Amino acid sequence: MTVFHLKRFPKVIFGEGAHKELPELIGHFGNKALIITMRDLFEIGLIDPVLETLRESNIDFKIYKDAKPEPKIENYKEVIDLVRSEDFDVIIGFGGGSVIDFAKGLSIVARHDKSIWDYVNLSNKPPAKIYSDKLLPVIAIPTTSGTGSEVTPYSVVINQDTEQEGTIKDESIIPKAAIVDPSFTVALPKEWTAITGLDAFAHALESLFNKENRTDYSDLIAMEAIRNIVQYLPLAFNDGNNMAAREKVAYGATLAGMAISLAGTTVCHALVHPTDARFGIPHGKSVSIYTSAVLRHTLPNGIDIFNKVIPIFNPQYEVSNKVSSISKGLNFIEEFIAQFSLDLRLSDYGINKKESDVILRDALGYMFRPIRQHEVIFDEKDLKKIIADCF
């Protein structure tokens, strides 16, 4: 067994109605909260149970409801004055991964002087130092079962000027607590149930292929995440009111977030970040576009990993050391992804093959670190083939 470190995770309160414990959590930090959410979540009333709970407990709060998908530097500039103008004790992120990432980013800039982009950790750019004693604590309440941001040390930011998407990575920005109440995911439209669920699936899967950081412990968490998502995501997709399925997918997504916190992602996300930044594809969709091609090009490496994963999709699969057998087994993974009827070609989003050179250049330019951590190190020629297979 390899040496591994048990990293800190937040306190997780899981289950239907878990949001009722929010006032007690806030009480550990004070009595004044800034709630970050999206306008549509506010307007459809999804956040109402949370607000009612806070009012009943006499918690002082303000709401910022203009958070946007895929946070950009400009979005931080729009709200920074509010964050710094009042003496908030805690930030609550209520929404999907973008909202929670945004809340974590705001916890940094609230009491730090630099631009949010300075704290982004790119392969070719070291980040500015984050001082943990200057952070506002964050409580995360996810309304999707996708990124696992409620338990990770990551916050994704897009720089529109440079057309880059990068990640802040610092254990000090892990939320102090996560309230995973699956009832908040019931309102998620069918397509977004699939998109976010496949993002969680990709997180767990990629963590298994990170040869530098994966451990027996991270593998254990990742495999449990995959089992839950594979079994229950189709059920939640076909019946959004199936609470048992929603609970299992939410559980799987949170576990997947823990898996990437421990092991990280690899080639798939190294290609996804430049694609998202330049072409605006929703993150879960771009992850699904690249997953199959990366897996197929990983062969003949990673046979032991494939032999653990493929039987989850088809229990009749016979473990084999033959590349041809494993290649056929990958059909089961591809069929799992395909059942959600998403557009899974780069060309579906108006990207042409000439533009794929830009994706490759960006991946090699500022995302080379996760590329080097994959089970097999792909060179420029390999990556070009992977991208070409996604058209």
Image (cartoon, rainbow, N blue to C red):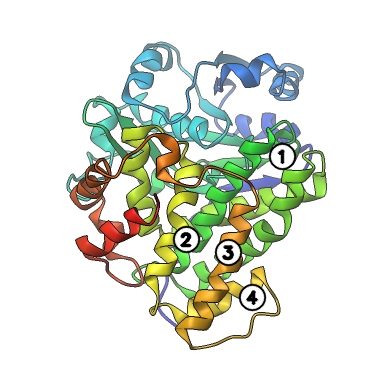
The type of residue carrying mark 4 is: Pro
Which residue does the numbered mark 1 point to in the structure image? 181
Q: Secondary structure at mark 3?
A: helix
Residues at circles 2 and 3 in contact by the CB criterion of under 8 Å: yes
Tag 2 residue: 292
Residue 96 figure quarter = top right
Task: Tell which circle, 2 or 3, labels the residue nearer the N-terminal end.
Answer: 2
Distance of label 1 from label 4 (alpha carbons): 30 Å
Q: Secondary structure at mark 2?
A: helix
**View extreme (bottom): residue:** 321
Numbered circle sitting on residue 333: 3
Using the rendered image of the protein, determine whether residue 218 is visible from the camera's viewpoint: yes
What residue does disc 4 label?
Answer: 311
- Three-letter residue code for mark 3: Ile
Alpha-carbon span between mark 2 and mark 4: 17 Å
Residue lying at 46% horizontally and 57% vertically, measured from the top left: 291
Q: Earlier in the sequence, mark 1 or mark 3?
A: 1
Sequence-first tag of 2 and 1: 1
